Image (cartoon, helix red, strand yellow):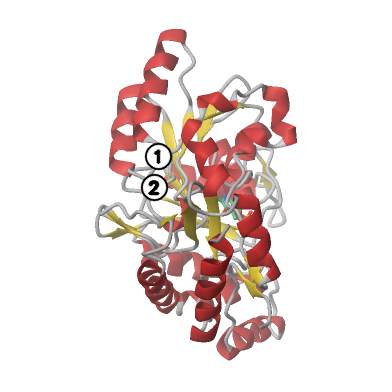
Amino acid sequence: MAFIPYGRQSITDDDIQSVVKVLQSDFLTQGPAVPAFEKAIGQYSDVAHVVASNSATSALHLACLALGVKAGDIVWTSPITFVASANCALYCGAKVDFVDIDANTYNISVEALTKKLKHAETVGKLPKVVIPVHLSGQPCDMKAIYALSLKYGFSIIEDASHAIGASYQGKKVGNCQFSDITIFSFHPVKIITTGEGGAATTKDTKLARKMQLLRSHGVTREASEMTQAADGPWYYQQIDLGFNYRMTDMQAALGLSQLTNLDKFIDARRVIAKKYNDGLSTLPLTLPWQDQAGESAWHLYIIRLDLTKTDSHLNVFKKLRAAEIGVNLHYMPVYRQPYYEQFNFDKNDYPNAEQYYAEAISIPVFYAFNDTEFAHVISSLKQSLLK
Ligand SMILES: *Cc1c(COP(=O)(O)O)cnc(C)c1O
């Protein structure tokens, strides 16, 4: 059996043709494909503005900057996420803090968030922005988080890197009904891909414009945004300190083509999740718990070991890897990263995240995952759990 990764992209001939077409065209970047991709994402997610970028990491940075995050500010996120959800605040010179996860969903805990906000208010350390992460593609309890944002005055960036195609209360994630900005990732391991790439969605015209400006050096060609009349047709002005975070037209063409298969990808992931739910139900494992308010995109299928009945986490992991199964752990709590040691987080503040880290394993889920591979994962897992 060839190695089975925990996730992988599916590229069609149409995907390839659409990239080739761009390569044969006049524009490799800053042509028509990026705006077309942005429009298509906007239609899919039912949101007015989409700003595509060269990664979700840069989109998170743009989102923080657009919301005015700067030195002296505090940004909160979940500790069980990829480091980029926290690093974006550090890029802006702000401080990061973490809110423990919910023991069932593994998303940011609304109970812990409520408690932490109450305390932060008394000590004058309320966050400027909170970044809920839709871990594995399951939407966070956005309605409750939004209600807290109104009470305590913070902005919300949804890190939906795992969650394009997921829905919350019957509507697509990315519509920003309960947030200021939502971020998608198009890294190959995610649900659809552009190679590298990301996007920020928002209902807010000003936030969208700010992110567009900062994506491309802070440079404008709009007369209304300039400090003086143009010197001539060559004229542009830099009115802010931006970056080059642009997506190329090759990437956008791939994304546009991938987007046509998104619902098919999600359906397949839901079928695999259902098969796992059935196939693993009798094993000493905790299977993913689904909040009825949302429908996951199933970027990840995360199991947790009942360590009183199974071999150790490390041994199960090693045995699965030896069986050519690319199991992974999403994620080590960010505060445990060596770079974050300087901030002196106390792991005792995050009991749910710590327990999750001791028990969780991501097993394969991707569009082209076949029945033979599925059977191999199930039988290997059964074997690996034995002491
Ligand atoms: C993948 C990922 C990112 C970063 O995405 P890139 O497109 O690789 O920059 C950010 N947050 C989460 C939760 C992710 O999984």
- Residue shown at 46%/79% (left/top)? 261
Mark 2 → mark 1, Cα distance in angstroms = 6 Å
Q: Position of residue 212 (x, y in %)?
A: 57, 50
Which quadrant of the figure contains the C terminus?
bottom right
Q: Tell me: residue 334, above or below residue 271.
A: above
Q: Between 159 and 24, which is closer to the camera in this rendering? A: 159
Asked if disc 2 and disc 1 are in contact, CB closer than 8 Å, the reply is yes
**Residue 52, located in which quarter of the rendered image?**
bottom right
Q: Is residue 131 left or right of residue 314?
A: left
- Residue shown at 51%/36% (left/top)? 77
Q: Position of residue 130 (x, y in %)?
A: 46, 34
Q: Is residue 112 left or right of residue 186?
A: left
Q: Is residue 183 left or right of residue 216?
A: left
**Residue 172, located in which quarter of the rendered image?**
bottom left
Which element carries disc 1, helix, strand or loop? loop
Extreme-front residue of the structure: 387
**Amino acid type assigned to the residue bearing label 1 in the image:** Asp
Q: Is residue 110 left or right of residue 132?
A: left
Q: Position of residue 266 (x, y in %)?
A: 41, 72
- Residue shown at 60%/23% (left/top)? 346
Q: Between 290 and 179, which is closer to the camera in this rendering? A: 290
Which element carries disc 2, helix, strand or loop? loop
What residue is shown with label 2?
105
The numbered disc on residue 102 is 1
Extreme-top residue of the structure: 123
